[in-house]
Amino acid sequence: MDETNRSERPETAAAGELPWDMPDRVAVVGAGAWGTTLANLLAGKGLEVDLWVYEPELCEMMARMSENVVYLPGVRIHRRVHPSSDLAGVVSGRSLVVFVTPSQVVRAMAERAAPHLLDDAILVCCSKGIEKGSLKLLPEVLDEVLGRRFANDAAFVSGPSFASEVSQGQPTSVAVAARDPRVAEHVRRVLGTDGFTLYVNADVVGIELCGAIKNVIAIAAGICAGRGFGHNTRAALITRGLGEIIKLGTAMGANPLTFSGLAGIGDLILTCTSDLSRNTTLGRRLGRGETLDAILEATHTVAEGIDTARSVHDLALKYDLEMPICNQVYAVLHQGADPAHFVEAVIARDKRRDVGTVKVT
């Protein structure tokens, strides 16, 4: 593997045998597109999967039709996937529990699940975001809710992965981070398939920040596209956006190498360049003149970048950082700024130095 990606590795993260056996039954909490996809993936490996579904009507429909017609239409649910609206029943006795809910409800779901979790359960968080108000990353939220006994037994998965393409069996690679490398290796072994590869990374903070902030940059990319700007503008915006992610990540203690890996530039490129991205689609519609309220009223999916934009704005103030792209997305979403002036505000606003250049005196 090249020098820039040494922080990620597909090989065993710790010498010797892992202290956990391959589970025969696991829990997945959250039945959106990604949760349903992961449940199918695990079931395809021969595991029995209890899938918690928030909406009782959808749960009944999934059990009856063997399809998640709301969030993952056209994909048959594996016979080993068992939808249920009983959270306690889903997580009780499971040695591995996967959380795949919107980031802003992770705290509430962890609180509800906590009394029913095994003391030695391994947690896998596939949600990505920054909690509103507290500005905590999801590892901090889980630590606060579940206590230190789970601090080293949680892994966090992030990277360039659309659920629909994983469901189609298209080759996909993501990163998995944990404080204990054995936990990350165990999760890599449980979730990994020939087509779904996980690369171990020790940088929990960097993985989570990349997964959160890339949604804000994707909204910016969508606004540019909606305003009629082309590939040149988008490439510049992605590059400068990565710089903002690195700036905040470094201030918060992330490993700079993480940003050149799958969870960093990999996920950023995917999210900013595809029509499958909810955040890019949201930005495109804003750029074309639709209001945020009208867009939200017409959709049932969550664009995580809306809440994350506010959190990133607050973090930039906290760390005294200049993040013009993220701040302008915040202004459009939460302060009524006109998207018509977006590009001029974040790219053509003044002359700046590029990375590695020397200031001329």
Image (spheres, grey):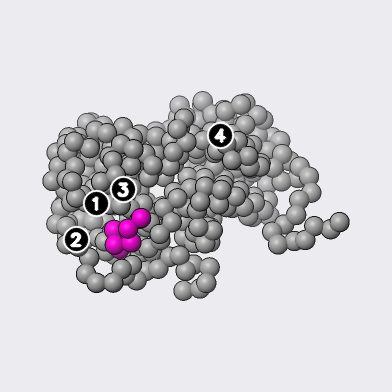
Q: Which mark is residue 314?
A: 4
The foreground one among 286 and 305 is: 305
- Residue at (36% x, 51% y) in the render: 156
Q: In 3D space, how far apart are the residues under numbered discs 3 and 1 (Cα atoms)? A: 10 Å
Residue 348 placement (x, y as % from top left):
75, 45
**Is residue 183 in the magenta section?**
yes
The kind of secondary structure element at disc 1 is strand
Q: In 3D space, how far apart are the residues under numbered discs 4 and 1 (Cα atoms)? A: 32 Å
Quadrant where the C terminus is found in the figure: bottom right
Is 331 left or right of 344, judged from the image as shown? left
Residue type marked 2: Trp
**Residue linked to disc 3:** 151
* In the image, residue 49 above or below residue 338: below
The kind of secondary structure element at disc 2 is loop
**Residue linked to disc 1:** 122
Residue 258 placement (x, y as % from top left):
49, 59
* In the image, residue 46 above or below residue 307: below
Q: Who comes first in sequence, dot 4 or dot 1?
A: 1
Q: Which mark is residue 19?
A: none
**Is residue 331 in the magenta section?**
no
**Residue linked to disc 2:** 20
Q: Is residue 280 visible?
A: no
Residue 22 placement (x, y as % from top left):
18, 61
- Badge 4: how crowded within 10 Å, few (<14), some, or many (20+)? some
Verify CB contact (< 8 Å) between mark 3 and mark 2: no
Tell which tag, 3 or 1, sits nearer the viewer. Answer: 3
The foreground one among 253 and 242 is: 253
